[in-house]
Image: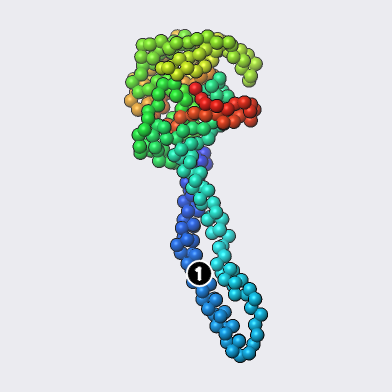
Amino acid sequence: MNLQVILGNFALILFVLMVLTGVVWFLDVFYLAKQRRAAADRALAEYDSRAAKATADGIKLDNHGRRAQIEADILRQPTWVEYSGSFFPVIALVFFLRSFLYEPFKIPSSSMVPTLLVGDLILVNKFTYGIRLPVINQKIIQINDPQRGDVMVFKYPKDMSQDYIKRVIGVPGDKITYENKRLTVNGVAVKYTPMDDYLNDERLVYNKQFQENLSGVSHRILNDDSKPTYGRDAVEAFPGRDENCTYRYEGFTCTVPAGNYFMMGDNRDNSADSRYWGFVPDKNIVGKAFFVWMNFSSLRRIGGIQ
């Protein structure tokens, strides 16, 4: 694991910080605090002994608050211990929430337009597809499997330090055909309903917009009539391509291998997805995107994800 991967893995950074601050916190609770208490008791006993001797000798001491000050000075935590103890529960809580419950993401590209816009801040459910160990992303408890139509976050197969978000088009065993910008799943043509053209704010052009019904999940997609069904030159020699996929001029057909998923962006002609770099293994799954909670460019962007 190189430095770039480590720096790009926020879960790993959180885990390391949690361990370091946790070790300091436990060390202080079960050892250092007791050592400071014992040192304070010895100092107070010595102070009381000197005070008693001075009193017996008729010497009047001005010890108002002095005893309490000695105790407080000795019991005071070192700065590094104090900060570690303060940060540990916060870091541990954040680590637990984002590792096992919900994790926030920001949409960086337009590949999922019109469903998700650039700058959308979304929440991803980390447990709906099973409980996974953080950092190594190893599934330990199976709950649900991804379904066609789900919007899913996953680790990019070519670079595990990058998180991608696309829509699940095919699950293990599915036969996916994409011809003339229309999907067929297991021999059944997906239904499309034309909608008003969509204005692309980035390029100031209109794209064809359709309502796609994928296994009962209705969502909007975009097509760019100026582009082909797929970019043949961009298709890579990904694992399993020769055994599972056939590419033709007008489209392609892929059978999704066991333990893998076929992903596509809703902005069909502006998305690098499984058509080009291949299938997504189950081990790469991060979670299911389910809610948009903010977009600083459009404060109205809030609600569920279809």
Q: Who is closer to the viewer here, 6 or 52?
A: 52
Q: Please, what is the three-letter code of the amino acid marked with disc 1? A: Arg
With respect to residue 129, does 198 lie above or below? above
What residue did someone put label 1 on? 37
Q: Position of residue 160 (x, y in %)?
A: 46, 34
Q: Who is closer to the viewer here, 232 or 179?
A: 179
Q: Secondary structure at mark 1?
A: helix
With respect to residue 186, does 238 lie above or below? below
Crowdedness near tag 1: few (<14), some (14–19) or many (≥20) residues, C-alpha within 10 Å = some
Toward the bottom, the furthest residue is 57
Q: Who is closer to the viewer here, 159 or 195?
A: 195
With respect to residue 212, does 73 lie above or below? below
State how many labels appear: 1
Q: Residue at x 55, y 27 (%)?
A: 303
Q: Is residue 21 left or right of residue 140?
A: right
Q: Residue at x 33, y 25 (%)?
A: 258
Report the coloring of the rendering: rainbow
Q: Residue at x 66, y 80 (%)?
A: 62
Q: Is residue 158 visible?
A: no
Q: Position of residue 158 (x, y in %)?
A: 45, 30
Q: Position of residue 74 (x, y in %)?
A: 56, 69
Question: Which image quadrant is residue 171 in?
Answer: top left
Q: Is residue 113 visible?
A: yes
Q: Residue at x 35, y 38 (%)?
A: 140
Q: Position of residue 44 (x, y in %)?
A: 55, 76
Q: Quadrant of the N terminus?
A: top left
With respect to residue 28, does 270 lie above or below? above
